[in-house]
Image (cartoon, helix red, strand yellow):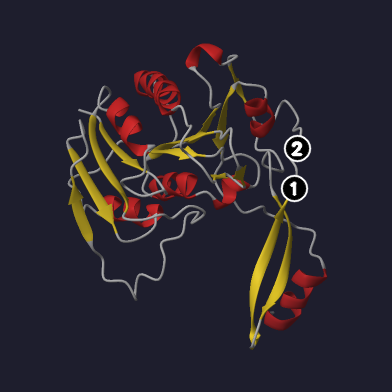
Amino acid sequence: MVRILVTNDDGVLAPGILPLAQAMTEHGDVTVVAPDTEYSGAGAAIGAIWERVPHVTRHQLDGVPEAWAVNGPPALAVMYARLGAFGGQFDLVVSGINPGANVGRSVYHSGTVGACLSGRNGGWSGIAVSQASTGWGVEGQAWDASNQKWETAATVASEFVRGFLKEPPSDVVIANINVPNLELSEIDGWAMTEVGGLPPRSMSQATLVPRPGQPDEFDVDVSWGEPVDLPEHTDGGTIERGKVSVTYLTRLEAERRTDLGSAEAALDQLLR
């Protein structure tokens, strides 16, 4: 039996994780291991583990055999699973459903994606599932998730996982899937995409605002840009056009260079 680890970055009780976990039970033995609270934007962080007493709490999720909440970000939850805290090894990490599309630069900050990165460190492939927000959403995060069409994203994820498990890739991969917030019948196909430079709406400026009577204290006033029309071949542009975006995220690899610049030459001078 295939073992599937389901997680997210919004918390074990967030509305997006239940339909995803329930959909995954069709494809294997599902265990939910997710943060105990909101960790959006945590990326692949594991936090200051020397300061935190590791703690997990069992939860009951309807139709899901086993569920746990971890007092840390999603990448840490997956790390605990890799180290055997929740039984044997898993075959696949499925993370989401995130309210707000994780496209463009938001991919680098996404805890939804970060959970899959943590799994890849242990040799597990991962599928990150996010859904665009038709309300106010910035940098991959939705301010209001009350109108999300979760079942659409869960159905897309389920069919992708079905094919993925039928013919698994030869290497460990991460697929970043972004689904429009539409009824399934309204989606205009899908496309293989590349990571764009920007999300559909991004932070545009940050200004420090002094706190009265506290000369060394400041609030940060962040302003938001207008929605951007993104190129069609990118993940964000595909979502804007009502299509499902599938992006395969590559490994972090060092580039071997022989043309030493001044920074490298300075090290060469110091350490030769």
At 36% from the left and 20% from the top, the residue drawn is: 162
At 75% from the left and 43% from the top, the residue drawn is: 226
Q: Which amino acid lies under the numbered mark 2 shown in the image of this protein?
A: Val
Q: Quadrant of the C terminus?
A: bottom right
Q: Quadrant of the N terminus?
A: top left
Question: Residue 241 placed where, x, y %?
Answer: 67, 22
User: Is 79 placed above or below 184 here?
Assistant: below
User: Is 40 placed above or below 155 here?
Assistant: below
Badge 2: few (under 14), some or many (20 or more) residues near its Cα, within 10 Å?
some
The residue pinned by badge 2 equals 228
Is residue 97 shown to the viewer in this render? Answer: yes
Is residue 93 shown to the viewer in this render? Answer: no
Considering depth in this image, is 140 or 6 the residue closer to the camera?
140
Helix, strand or loop at label 1? It is: loop
Q: Is residue 51 left or right of residue 26?
A: right
Q: Are marks 1 and 2 in contact (CB under 8 Å)?
A: yes
The residue pinned by badge 1 equals 225
Q: Number of numbered discs present?
A: 2
Furthest toward the right, the residue is 262
